[in-house]
Amino acid sequence: MENSKYVCDMTKGNEVSLLLRFALPMLVGNIFQQFYNMVDSVIVGRFVGSVALGAVGAVGSLNFLFFSLCMGLGAGLGVLISQYFGAGEDEYVKKVIANAVYITAGAGMLMSVCGALFAEPILRLMNTPQENFADALVYMRIVCGATVVVAGYNMISSVLRALGDSRTPLVFLVVACGINAVLDLLFVVGFQMGVAGAAWATVIAQVIAMLGSVCFGIRRNPYLKLGRRHFQFDFNILKKSLRIGLPIAGQNALIAFSCVALQSVVNRFGPVVMAAYTATSRVEQLVQQPFGSLGAAVSTFAGQNAGAGRYDRVATGCKKSIYIVIIFSLLMVAVMFLFSDQIVRLFVEEPEVIAIGARGLRITSFMYIGLGLIYVMRGMLNGVGDAAFAMVNGITEVIGRIGFAWLLMMIPSVGMWGVWYTNGLTWVLTGLANVLRFAQGKWKTKSVVSHMI
């Protein structure tokens, strides 16, 4: 395969340098993505009100639940591509990319239909307060109904990143973020469309990011120059992508279910706590971005090196990534204790909401190290194809969020603060489970390529 600046071989060179060079564009892109999520929240919170902000937050975990299947399949396809790329199987890489179109389109359309049809009964099962219900229903039907768009963008991003290109998705995501901010102001403030305006702005921005990445990738990346032979449907590829992707999708779905269950607990405390929890969730999503970017870099790094049989490099890269997690986590503790009030004030103006949200951020900040461990270790395990453990991850998060919430709600002195303690303790529990799996070393036998060869 011809050399290209849009392809990066991570089986050679300094591990930390490769990981950071891959992760930094992803970090910028993820921050911009969270930025336009935050723009939605800031504009809705300030121009529509805290009730509408709580409604948007109530749908957040449901969005993730519907996206989870598409995200899991995208991750599975990305693992296949990175491992075959590391093994030098260029023709098979192209076949996987072509078949990814069928798999992603089917899963995306299925989730879009389900999101639109079942929005109302799901929101009622979540104990969504009546004053938030109408806005939450409108927002969910629009955003979840467009899951196929998210699936498309997630697929092309997974393909490009598996080949070592984290820059192309960034470029179009930045453009989309700017468009989203403009459309938010136009639809919500100018046209007075409320939460529907914020939802449509997000969907349109995602369409632009997807189409831009696909068109540019086809023109510039040699692995996306596909022939008719590559588009012949291959059941072997489907089988392998499902073997890796379905456990990851199941993991994501279980995590989303645990978040939905916790959100239903939050809803019982009323609109004020819902608004505070939504604000802190948006902030924590931003804090997670360095972890998520590093975890994605580790996943591609691990996939390529597992395909090449370089398990020593996989272990070294993972260990060095943990040091980065520790440093960043300690920095974030200081930031939350010094500036949490000002941070929450960006979203809302009500003093009670600000006070609750600021304390919530200080509570969870002590447990950011657990969150970072989840991303790095999960990225490594997914990258090498340790699909079975992905489900264990998801089950652990369900046990943590439901178990800790149940235990803490039984303690009267804890009250609503148990919501934030539950999240933090779940991160620590799941992070330690991942470290234990890494220490066992079973992941060294999970590569898809090694089974083929």
Image (cartoon, grey):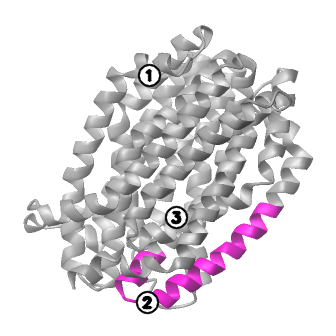
Amino acid bearing label 3: Arg
Judged by depth in the image, the label closer to the viewer, 2 or 1, is 1
- Give the mark, 2 or 1, whose residue is nearer the N terminus: 1
Label 1: state its secondary structure.
helix
Tell me if residue 276 comes above or below residue 211 in the rendering.
above
- Is disc 3 surrounded by few (<14), some (14 to 19) or many (20+) residues within 10 Å? many
Q: Which residue is mark 2?
A: 310
Would you say residue 305 sits in the magenta stretch?
yes
- The quarter in which the C terminus is drawn is bottom left
Tell me if residue 351 comes above or below residue 11 in the rendering.
above
Secondary structure mostly seen in magenta is helix
- Is disc 1 surrounded by few (<14), some (14 to 19) or many (20+) residues within 10 Å? some
Residue 271 sits in quarter: top right
Q: Residue at coordinates 33% horizontally, 57% vertically from top-left? A: 245
Q: Which residue is mark 3?
A: 378
Q: Position of residue 153 (x, y in %)?
A: 38, 49
Q: Would residue 174 be found to the left or right of residue 11 on screen?
A: right
Q: Residue at coordinates 77% horizontally, 47% vertically from top-left? A: 364
Q: Would residue 163 be found to the left or right of residue 34 on screen?
A: left
Q: Residue 447 or 67: which is nearer the viewer?
A: 447
Amino acid bearing label 1: Ile
Q: Position of residue 84 (x, y in %)?
A: 29, 78
Query: Can residue 180 be seen in this snapshot?
Result: yes
Label 3: state its secondary structure.
helix
Amino acid bearing label 2: Arg
User: Which residues make up the magenta segment?
Assistant: 301-330
- Give the mark, 1 or 3, whose residue is nearer the N terminus: 1
Q: Residue at coordinates 37% horizontally, 81% vertically from top-left? A: 445
Evaluate if marks 2 and 3 touch, with contact meaning CB atoms under 8 Å apart.
no
Tell me the tag on residue 122.
Answer: 1
Q: Position of residue 267 (x, y in %)?
A: 64, 21
